[in-house]
Amino acid sequence: MKPAPFDYHVPDSLEKALDLLHEYGDQAKLLAGGQSLVPAMNFRVVQPSILIDLNRVGELGYIREEDSVLRIGAMTRERQLEFDPLIPRWSPLLEEAMPHVAHPQIRNRGTLGGSLANADPAAELPVIMLALGARLKARSASDERWIDAQDFFSGMFTTDLAPDEILVEIELPANPPRTGWSFMEVAPRAGDYALMGVAALVTLDENGVCRQARLVYLNAGDGPVDANDAAAILKGQVPGDDVIESAADSASQTEINPFGNVHTSPEFQRHLANVLTKKALKQAVKRASEDNLQ
Amino acid sequence: MTQLHPVALKVNGIPYKREVESRLLLSDFLRHELGLTGTHVGCEHGVCGACTILFDGQSMRSCLIFAVQANGHSIMTVEGLASSHSGRPEEGLHPLQQAFWEAHGLQCGYCTPGILMTMIPFLEQNPSPTEDEIRHALSGNLCRCTGYQHIVDAVKLAAEKMR
């Protein structure tokens, strides 16, 4: 229950962090909030020989509006996402999900970038970023590139990041008008890993016809699971009960692939996905009709 | 020989300087280097909340922070609670501690320091919490004795005392 020895580096700028990562490559692990990495190190499941601590790279902690996007630094604490007044204005879906992200003590330390780079299929933030169509900026010592959220998560605890890249920024687009949202999950206790969870976004036109929909699930496969077929069922329809039921059936029966765990069977997870999808879609449609967004 | 890193930090207002191995957890630093054994170690993987301390005023799990990361920061542990209230620990308990005493908010006491350190910033930000809010705020702290009811009662009583 104590970590194995490691060499510790604590750069005070992004440039220095990138140089260190360039030098050590996959020998090194980046330490963000440490709320998943440190437990894994305590268990000695992970034994990096070198740890590069990003907690003194102050330039990676910010939330700011720019043109038509919201930019969030990768080292922004989850607590800041929970309380910053820009978040409800830009993304009420993210606002709604934040209290479900672990416990207050974890959110005080954990970071957005850390959660995304960790890519836990049971985590909320990867699901939210995929649902919102976020773009993620990766930097290396020599290069920078943007990665769409849907290309970023490549499997269980695996991302598209190269060993010499650092996730530095998350860019959220503005929602179109008449977009409704909902995040729902079922967990044994508040803050625990959820058995099942769903993020729903629905955009309606003036006549109440669905123009765009997105349903993304947590703990439903080896990464955040995007139910495209369910979204296609909603598109072009007035989302009444029948349409919502078809979408929920598609997502829960054919599109997700839950594994079950000590708390739940895959069948129960599919049942939860079905129930949560119907509830979340109804709430999202209601909110879209009310046009609560600015 | 593992490299040692200098750490200078404040704990309960008192400055300390030590040299630590990088892998030393803040929870073990507080207990073994400084002798502040009020911070309890339960699970060491961030689930139980027994090791919760204040890191620059915010509740965090000290088993998920390396001691070297606390360099330059200000920590508060349960030992600092009484004096943080009156400036003089001999004058008695912090109202939160007093409320736990009066409402029987503990049995074995193992989880209590972590719960107290979680509730301090919670009650500062939310001086009149509902029972739901209290239970949500307590969700990251496990207690295996009480069934939580008396803990919730104690937090309610503390909120009254501290308003």
Image: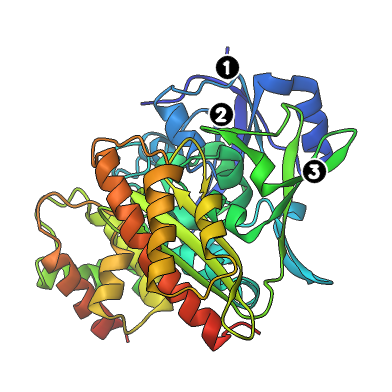
> Looking at the image, which is closer to me, A214 or A243?
A243
Label 1 amino acid? Thr
Q: Upstream in the sequence, badge 2 or badge 1?
A: 1
The reply to whether residue A262 is visible in this rendering is yes
| Residue bearing mark 1 | B2
Q: Position of residue B119 (x, y in %)?
A: 33, 67
Q: Mark 3 falls within which chain?
A: A
Whole-percent x, y for residue B2 in the image: 57, 17
Q: Residue at x 41, y 76 (%)?
A: B124
Q: What is the C-alpha distance between the residues marked 1 and 3?
A: 26 Å
Numbered disc 2: secondary structure:
loop
The 10 Å Cα crowd at callout 1, few under 14, some 14 to 19, many 20 or more, is: few
User: Looking at numbered disc 3 in the image, what kind of residue is underneath it?
Assistant: Leu
Residue A23 picture location, percent across and down? 80, 22
Q: Residue at x 44, y 59 (%)?
A: A247
- Residue that mark 3 sits on: A14
Q: Is residue A7 left or right of residue B47?
A: right
The image quadrant of residue A166 is top right
Is there CB contact under 8 Å for labels 2 and 3?
no
Q: Identify which residue is drawn at 19% across, 70% down.
A: B152
> How are the colours assigned in the image?
rainbow
Chain letter of disc 2? B
Q: Residues within 10 Å of mark 3 (few under 14, many from 20)?
A: many
Residue receiving disc 2: B22
Which quadrant holds the N terminus of chain B? Answer: top right
User: Mark 1 — on which chain does it sit?
Assistant: B
Alpha carbons under labels 2 and 3: distance apart = 21 Å
In this view, the residue in front, A118 or B149, is A118
Determine contact: label 2, label 1, CB under 8 Å: yes
